[in-house]
Image: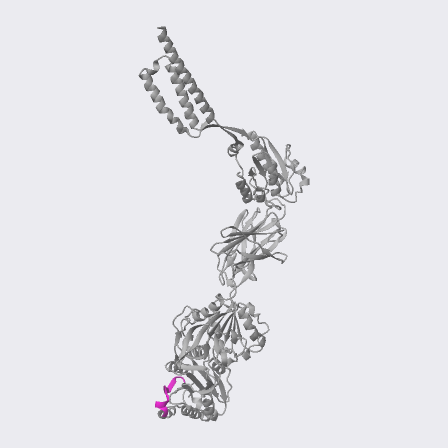
Amino acid sequence: MTLEAPWALAILVPFIIAIAISFLRGKGRKRGGYLVAVCRSLVVASLAIALGRPHIVETTKIGEITALLDTSSSMAGAQGERLLSKASSLAQALGVPMRVVPFARRSGSAINDFSSYDSVRSGSATLDPSATNLEAALASLRATTGQIAFLLSDGYESVGHALSALASGDNPRIFPFSVDGEPEPQGISITQLYAPQVVKSQQRADVRVSLANSLSVRAEGTLIVTHGSAKILERVLTIPSNQEVTVSTESDPKIEGLQPIVATYSWRDSTGTRSVSRTSWLSSEKRDKVLLLSGSPDDDRFLSRILRGQSYQLRDEIASPTLPTSLDPLSDYRAIILNNVPASSLPPQLLQSVNPYVKGGGSLVTIGGDRSYGLGGYIGSAVEEILPVRLVPPHVEKKRLTVAVQLVIDKSRSMAMDARLEFAKAAAREVLASLKDDDFIGVIGFDDVPFIALPISQVGPVRYSAADRISRLYPTKKTNLFPALDEARRGMARVNAGRKHVIVLTDGKLPDPGTYYFDLVRQMRVLGVTLSTVVVGADADDGFLANLAKLGGGSFYQTSDPTNLPKIFLSDVKVASDEKSIRENPEIKVSRGPSGVSSTSLSDFPTLRGFVETLPRDSARTELIVSEEGRSFPLLASWQVGKGRACSFTSDANGRWSSRWIEWPSINEFWSDIVESTISTSGKARSNIDFELRSWVEGGEVVVDLSVFQEAGASTPRGEVTLPSSERVPLGLREISPGHYQGRLQKAVAGKYTASVLIGDAALPQIAWEISEDSFSERPRFKPNTPLLQQIASRSGGIVNPDKEALAKQLEVATNKRDLSRIFASIALLLFLLEIICREFNRLYRSFGRSAG
């Protein structure tokens, strides 16, 4: 008997004390007093016990244990025998009878004669041993009367869902038993090929290959690991006998997209050359594809270099009506950049495709120049509709800029032939006469050292003295152009003019041509300086001076008649502009626009020398402005167009107007910000979500398990899976817990699976995995499927591989709990009545005694 409230017995303490005091005073020693005291004590004791809620628990032992025995082909005979022997011995030690229910694809009837595993298996051939159905076996336990059951299986199921059979909750406690199966065949195996599922663009990922040798001799062979088409490891590798080795390498950062990583180990033995292979899949984030169309090589030279350094996959083309047919569809590009491109240079089909491309989610960046916007013939085109600026028609107005000209003239000894130097001096004087007083001129002669005949100066103050200075050039010594050209660069750097131009005159090949000349000319172009070259004489140029002029943005001339030099110089120096929509000035300040700067994080910008006149649109963001003649014009504007975005910059990117921007330390950041701002706010968003996607085969189905490790909003992930048959099927993901989702694909088969998942508008990188034939074959395995066996035990209240002590506690089950409170209350009542009777009898007895006396 057990009391639920043993504290109730405390009421006996004061009563016992009171009885003791009464007897000590002699009151309880009278005749009949002992009997009354005993009755009262029993009444109080009975009431105290009743208040303590006494009860007794009746227990019974399990009368029989049901053991589910796996007889499928995946169970090796020795493995099944050890499982059956282990369970039988434990049941016998507990003194509980055991019956066996065999199962394979179907569940059979219970048998009591199981002398050996082979006898049970042979008698259960009709259960179809070609598959394992744990669900059917566990479901059969619902009809049993026992409270516990054994599961004797390797835990691998090829049909059904074992855990589904436990969903109802009215199952006995299940105690799985597991033992190792037959050892794997001896040989070389790739036990692991590790690579992360996703790696960032242009980054390397760790790849690890583990190989095991279970042979009695060491293996010597070659391990080759490939990533896509690239070989990332080739190593001669020796694997000691009965040991495992791990080799590490890295993925190829240049490979993008979803590509296989394949590890192959080849070796020779007595049978010949053998090899083992294993495949994993790595998804390298793709760089954004950007199409850059420039109007000329001169427009392209800076911008293409900047964008290639910003992790874009750049397709760089010089625009022409006959662009290569291999040009990808516009939908393949995240952004298109039109860099000073006239509409006439674009194929009509491409020109018409830009508008729907942007509205459908693409990005467009347009850059100014003398062949862009209104000057480029875009007025009335489909492109004009999506630009965030209004175009201005070009119209005629003659305009002349301040010009700075540096003449670099060869005065080596050979220039005395045919009076070449004299005609060169005459050409210099003609140039001087053609320039305005506000222009600048400088003359540098060179032999083996530079001779500054006329430092770069404003023409007005030196017009009359300059002719005398030019006449001081005399032929002498050898030819060395580079120092003189560098001096011309330094002179131009000090001049503030709208146009800066250098003319180099020589009569022969340079003795020291080299790449440093091209580096110097590039520095001049950064300063906004153009360069032309002139060769006088019959010797043909070898192409060096012509290439120098091409890089310098000027022209190349060659003449055998020195009398042509004045005409050549004057023609090359002539500068004029007749488009009013081009605004040029040596110092044009850049200011913040009314909408504020949002396309870049930069806030301070260099001055410009010019821009294309456009007008703002009411619904667009005018982020940067430039002012000229008291008016403000857009420099940088952007807006949303349908699902896409367009951004316009009305100055150039080739250094003609933006020479100070080319040498600006933040130029790379500026153009990267501009392109990135159009990409990140248009079209399908790129995902930065941290996630893990796993898969496995369960009950003939592929389970796809997705874990998202950060807040993904209210959107439930959705997606599709490409099956080994190339069929695409939807992946119905359901939430298991916050951030944890699962989907199932029916009728799993071996092969490659590819999952594409969206969370909201964010696309996760594609993930691929392969399921081998081993996942479906009913073959013996060395290690049991312990994770599934543990889940079965946990959900049913059992444990895996119980010992005798643990199982003995489970065999005694409480079946009845009897409450004894009423019995003790009734005893108290009867004792109370007895006490009354005794007390009355004692009183009558004393009265009779007094009467008799």
Q: Position of residue 135 (x, y in %)?
A: 60, 43
Query: Dividing the picture into quarters, in which one does residue 98 lie?
Result: top right
Q: What stretch of residues is rendered in magenta?
A: 446-463
Q: What residue lies at 63% left-to-right and 38% top-to-bottom?
A: 102
Q: Is residue 722 above or below residue 786?
A: below
Residue 62 in the figure: left or right of residue 827? right
Q: Nearer the viewer, residue 293 or 812?
A: 812
Q: Nearer the viewer, residue 82 or 36?
A: 36
Query: Dividing the picture into quarters, in which one does residue 465 lie?
Result: bottom left
Quadrant of the drawing holding the C terminus: top left
Q: Is residue 833 above or below residue 111?
A: above
Q: Position of residue 551 (x, y in %)?
A: 47, 79
On the question of residue 461 being in view, the answer is yes
Residue 695 among those drawn in magenta = no
Q: Nearer the viewer, residue 35 or 294?
A: 35
Residue 449 among those drawn in magenta = yes
Q: Position of residue 324 (x, y in %)?
A: 58, 74
